[in-house]
Amino acid sequence: MHKFSLLDLSPIPEGKTAADALASTVDLAKAAEQFGYHRYWLAEHHNMPGIASAATSVVIGHVAGATSTIRVGAGGIMLPNHAPLVIAEQFGTLATLYPDRIDLGLGRAPGTDMATARALRRHMAPEDSFPQDVQELIGYIDDTSETTPVRAVPGAGTHVPVWILGSSLYGAQLAAWLGLPYAFASHFAPAMLEQALSIYRSTFQPSDRLDRPYVMMAAGVCAAPTDAEAEYLRSSQVLAFARLRSGKPGKLPHPTHELDAEIPAPIMAQVRQALSCSATGSAATVRRDLRTLLDTFQPDELIVTGMIHDHASRVRSFEIAAEVLTDLSEGAAAA
């Protein structure tokens, strides 16, 4: 692992607004650039009162305009919600404005509930057209003839890097078949991580875009000066995830020392398993746990994420994580 990146969902904390969350996203992106993160990705979610990145391409443009070197992209765009041509135009425009800095990660899930998915689309197609839609989109952003009946302008010839995202075996198989880089959502769905990476690596077919498998895995991170403080800060995300699992999504809660009193035991067990691909604690603890993950799964790149109610503490958490990951990366390079 030689590169590390950051995934930001633009969380809206209790007591704050979407405007506050988006301002915090820009501030964190600027800090991430200084800390040495390679990419800064944002994700598409809809009808979520605690997430401000629904108009993902708009936020990507805002972040790219406020930074200068860090790659900015989607982790990801939920392609079933959109016509491939529209996404090709959006990301072709971003790549035209910010050359060689834009990434496009594509997911197959709607990123929301089914009622909202219906509201996002003119119609709900019964068939799964995701593989065809991915290929159609790539066709728009690759080199095309001026006589092609439908062209993405801007978009054609931009060759925006396309990633397949996944939390199951489906995305691994598709990424391998298309010869695209693969990002696994192990920060909230780690169960199939090992099997998915094995399938992707063993069945990968080289393409014009990628000659060998390239894996990014995701991990949650909450770092602080002490283990106790980090556990306290992380309680916000644990509580938010538990409420989401219980069908009660909301803004990012204030941290608490009373998690067990707030979350029923069966839900807590589900949350602990879902968020198990993570590192929480002091720099030493985070280093130990991230090193274990890296040694076990051998990703080409690690993308970290984490939601903390207090913005300054969140920035500090990613600063500590960057220091740890820089050290681990340099150690791996020297080995």
Image (spheres, helix red, strand yellow):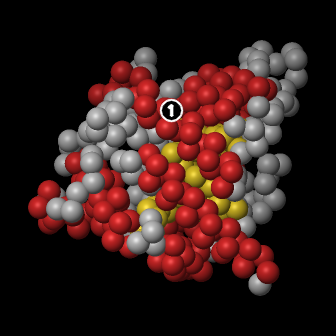
Q: Nearer the viewer, residue 123 or 98?
A: 98
Quarter of the figure with the N terminus: bottom right
Relative to 261, say whether 250 is above or below: above
Horizontal side, residue 93 vs residue 241: left or right: right
Relative to 289, say whether 4 is above or below: above
Quarter of the figure with the C terminus: bottom right
Q: Can residue 133 be seen in this view?
A: no
Q: Which residue is drawn at 41% across and 23% down?
A: 120
Q: Which of 237 and 88 is in front in this view?
A: 237
Q: Position of residue 95 (x, y in %)?
A: 75, 31
Q: Residue at x 40, y 29 (%)?
A: 18
> Circle 1 — which element?
helix
Relative to 316, say whether 20 is above or below: above
Q: Where is residue 330 in the image (x, y as percent from the top left)?
A: 74, 74
Residue at numbered disc 1: 23
Check disc 1 and give the amino acid type.
Answer: Ala
Q: Nearer the viewer, residue 124 or 332?
A: 332
Q: Is residue 99 visible?
A: yes
Q: Position of residue 135 (x, y in %)?
A: 68, 38
